[in-house]
């Protein structure tokens, strides 16, 4: 996240036996992760500054993996 509040995303892809990191918009990275059924990792700083847990009746909040 920049000082202006801009978020950046990365997509990690296995390719030819190695891992390739691709820059992306967070919304695109989230959309691909949801469609692919893979984990979404969020930095602790982003969660502290912009994260929230939606309050819904009779439901538990989703689990989010936070990375330091």
Image (cartoon, rainbow, N blue to C red):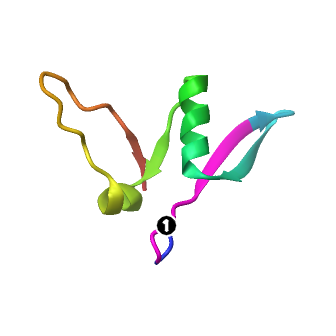
Q: Is residue 18 visible?
A: yes
Judging by the rendered image, the residue that carries numbered circle 1 is 1
Q: Residue at x 66, y 51 (%)?
A: 24
Residues drawn in magenta: 4-13
The residue lying toward the viewer, choosing from 42 and 59, is 59
Q: Residue 33's x, y, as percent?
A: 57, 32
With respect to residue 19, does 17 lie above or below?
Answer: above
Residue shown at 72%/49% (left/top)?
Answer: 21
Q: Toward the viewer: 23 or 6?
A: 6
| Residue 59 on image: x %, y % | 19, 23
Is residue 5 within the magenta segment? yes
Q: Is residue 66 left or right of residue 33?
A: left
Query: Which residue corresponds to the image point at 60% horizontal and 42% vertical from the top-left?
Result: 29
Q: Is residue 44 left or right of residue 4?
A: left
Kindly tell me whether residue 38 is visible in this rendering.
no
In the rendered image of this protein, does residue 48 appear above or below residue 52? below
Question: With 49 as the anchor, is 26 left or right in this view?
Answer: right
């Amino acid at each position: 996240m920049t000082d202006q509040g801009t978020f950046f995303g990365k997509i990690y892809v296995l390719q030819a036996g190695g891992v390739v990191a691709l820059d992306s918009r967070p919304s695109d990275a989230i959309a691909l992760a949801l469609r692919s059924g893979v984990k979404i990792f969020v930095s602790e700083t982003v969660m502290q500054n912009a994260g929230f847990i939606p309050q819904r009746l009779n439901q538990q909040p989703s689990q989010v993996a936070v990375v330091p």
